[in-house]
């Protein structure tokens, strides 16, 4: 009888099962199931108020799960405080730009890399993508332009060597040339580091350019899910966003 080799089940990088969340008595996320596979990029799209940012905040522990579970590489993280989740190599880049404006650029980066030799190496690396960073280490982060602050946020997330990255509306307010640059950076760094990326976006073309799969969120529920390379994916997403 021929031998049968059973392939081990691949544990998702991030998994939400039956997840509900919100603010006080207002339920925003409703019994949501979502899986982020190892090493993939999943783009979460939807109109404002559909629950995209709420989902990321719930995953990170800033909002409590009202029902269901969140698992990180098979381990339940629901109910853990944000700092414990972050220490499990999860980086979170929120929409409201969590920089410390009164700290300089270098000190904002030291928040995730406190070894000076490692920091110098990291700064030289991300400086290849964003040349202003090594040139302005002593400049206060709050005096950077909006686009530069977004790039600094992304650089800080990358140098933390994450296994899972959560990124919320990174392209908002950016010039098209900078958006194109971010696509290149994320693709190259994902191949280099192997992280899994859940990215919330309203820029459909950017989302499909950087993501392997997409999900559309409506009223706290998944309304559509598919591969970014599928024929007609952009049209279907835009139709959802118009309704």
Image (tube, rainbow, N blue to C red):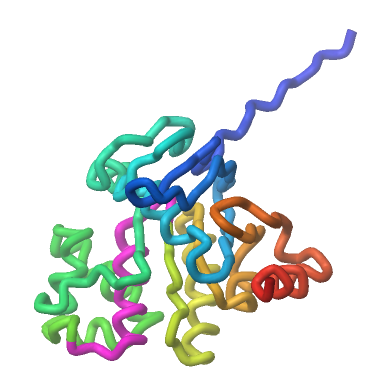
Query: What residue occupies the far right of the structure in this picture?
Result: 1
Judge left or right: residue 17 versus residue 5.
left
Judge left or right: residue 152 versus residue 46.
left
The answer to whether residue 115 is above or below residue 241 is: above
> Range of the magenta residues?
143-165
Give the image quarter of residue 231. bottom right
Magenta-highlighted stretch: main secondary structure? helix
Give the image quarter of residue 205. bottom right
Q: Where's residue 101, x and y in %?
A: 15, 78
Q: How many marks?
A: 0
Residue occupying the point 48% across, 58% down? 51
Residue occupying the point 43% across, 45% down? 21
Q: Where's residue 38, x and y in %?
A: 56, 45
Residue occupying the point 47% across, 92% down? 175
Q: Residue 163, can we see it?
A: no
Instruction: State yes or no: residue 21 in magenta.
Output: no
Q: Nearer the viewer, residue 22 or 104?
A: 22
Q: Quadrant of the C terminus?
A: bottom right
Q: Where's residue 168, x and y in %?
A: 43, 66
Judge left or right: residue 128 versus residue 133.
right
The answer to whether residue 96 is above or below residue 223 is: below
Q: Quadrant of the N terminus?
A: top right
Q: Where's residue 125, x and y in %?
A: 34, 73
Give the image quarter of residue 107. bottom left
Residue occupying the point 50% across, 53% down? 196
The answer to whether residue 51 is above or below residue 9 is: below
Judge left or right: residue 74 versus residue 116.
right
Query: What residue occupies the far front of the structure in this picture?
Result: 25
Q: Residue 49, can we see it?
A: yes
């Amino acid at each position: 009888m021929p031998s049968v080799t059973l392939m081990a089940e691949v544990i998702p990088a991030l998994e939400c099962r039956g997840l509900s969340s919100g603010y006080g008595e207002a339920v925003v996320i409703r019994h949501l199931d979502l899986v982020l596979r190892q090493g993939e990029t999943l783009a979460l799209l939807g109109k404002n108020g559909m629950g995209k940012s709420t989902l990321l905040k719930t995953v990170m522990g800033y909002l409590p799960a009202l029902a269901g579970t969140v698992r990180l590489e098979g381990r339940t993280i629901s109910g853990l405080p944000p700092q414990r989740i972050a220490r499990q190599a999860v980086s979170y880049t929120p929409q409201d730009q969590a920089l410390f404006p009164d700290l300089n650029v270098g000190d904002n980066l030291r928040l995730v890399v406190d070894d000076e030799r490692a920091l110098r190496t990291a700064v030289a690396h991300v400086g290849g993508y964003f040349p202003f960073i090594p040139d302005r280490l002593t400049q206060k982060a709050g005096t950077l332009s909006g686009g530069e602050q977004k790039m600094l946020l992304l650089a800080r997330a990358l140098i933390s060597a994450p296994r899972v990255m959560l990124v919320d509306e990174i392209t908002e307010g950016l010039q098209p040339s900078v958006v194109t640059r971010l696509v290149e950076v994320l693709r190259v760094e994902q191949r280099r580091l192997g992280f899994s990326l859940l990215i919330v976006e309203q820029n459909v073309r950017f989302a499909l350019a950087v993501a392997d799969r997409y999900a559309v969120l409506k009223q706290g529920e998944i309304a559509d899910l598919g591969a970014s390379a599928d024929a007609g994916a952009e049209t279907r997403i835009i139709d959802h966003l118009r309704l």
